[in-house]
Amino acid sequence: MRIIVAKPRGFCAGVERAIKSVETALERFGPPVYVLNHIVHNAHVVNELREKGAVFVRNLNEVPHGAHLLFSAHGVGPDRWEQAQDLRLQVIDATCPLVEKVHHEARRFALKNHTIILIGEKGHDETVGTMGWAPENIRIIQRKEDVASLEVSDPSKLAYITQTTLSVEDCQEIIEALQKRFPEIQGPPKADICYATSNRQAAVKALAQEVDLVLVVGDPESANSTRLAEVARSKGKPAYLIPDASAIHLEWLNGVNTLLLTSGASVPEKHVQGVLAFLNSLASCAVEEYELVHEDVHFRLPRNIGGDERP
């Protein structure tokens, strides 16, 4: 079997920073260090950090007064900051800087009294956090079909922002539908979908035509991983989202001569290598890595855990 391994794949700069933030906090302050929600959407990563002493919570009332608390890469609204202050928690903000950009846009448009259309998944940690910064102004939509039912009091004071991990093509269709119905709508000066999401989707689009099957290593809760499988299917290719090699069904491989392997932005590389090792154990494989875009992006750690140094 021929296996094409896409690059870029795996950790983006925001995920790298978030995980390193937890590890550094544990080294500096000792366990337990508390984390609101999963630091990133990957069960393997969460379990490994839990074994090192991280405690993951859904409610700040579960955190002892004065404890160290990390906000995850997905970000939070101001209500969480206020609650953390009331509990005298020592907050380490691991919010991805690209998510913070969207928060800034929400605040900026809200100050202008704009109605803000947030394109994203309802209930996703990132969109919940973003909505918290302008709850009176934001309306969330998820599909192009949602545009037709939007009721806007003043179309001249309308803006859109987006979740950072959406399908690039689907998001563009929604934006175009908004622009067609509301010609005066404003958007961010630079697209909100993050570089890593765009690059990984572009790699799948470019390489899927050459293969019989696409395997995406990623967690089912990971929006960007889910999108990669959807992108492959949109190109007419069978695609499966798997957390690791143990989830592969042998019947998927029947008649497959060429396979594309990639991974979401919150996936450790060892799980991609685990899939390769498993496939090689079944039959000899010719592995080729294709790099479509070179990534060299890193974000500094939060200042209160050594952010003057590169992670």
Image: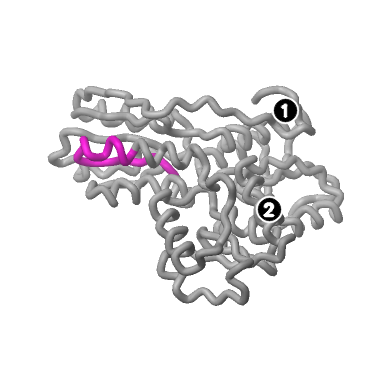
State the mark number for residue 287.
none
Q: Give the CA separation, mark 2 to mark 1.
A: 24 Å
Point 68% across, 40% down: residue? 94
Quadrant that contains the N terminus: top left
**Residue beneath label 2, please?**
76
For the image, the number of numbered tags is 2
Is residue 288 within the magenta segment?
no
What amino acid is found at the position of numbered circle 2 in the picture?
Val
Q: Secondary structure at mark 2?
A: loop
Q: Position of residue 263 (x, y in %)?
A: 40, 37
Q: Position of residue 98 (x, y in %)?
A: 60, 42
Q: Position of residue 97 (x, y in %)?
A: 64, 40
In this view, 302 is above or below 149? above
Image-quadrant location for residue 46:
top right
Instruction: Tell me the mark number nearer the camera, choosing from 2 and 1.
Output: 2
Q: Secondary structure at mark 1?
A: helix
**Residue beneath label 1, please?**
27
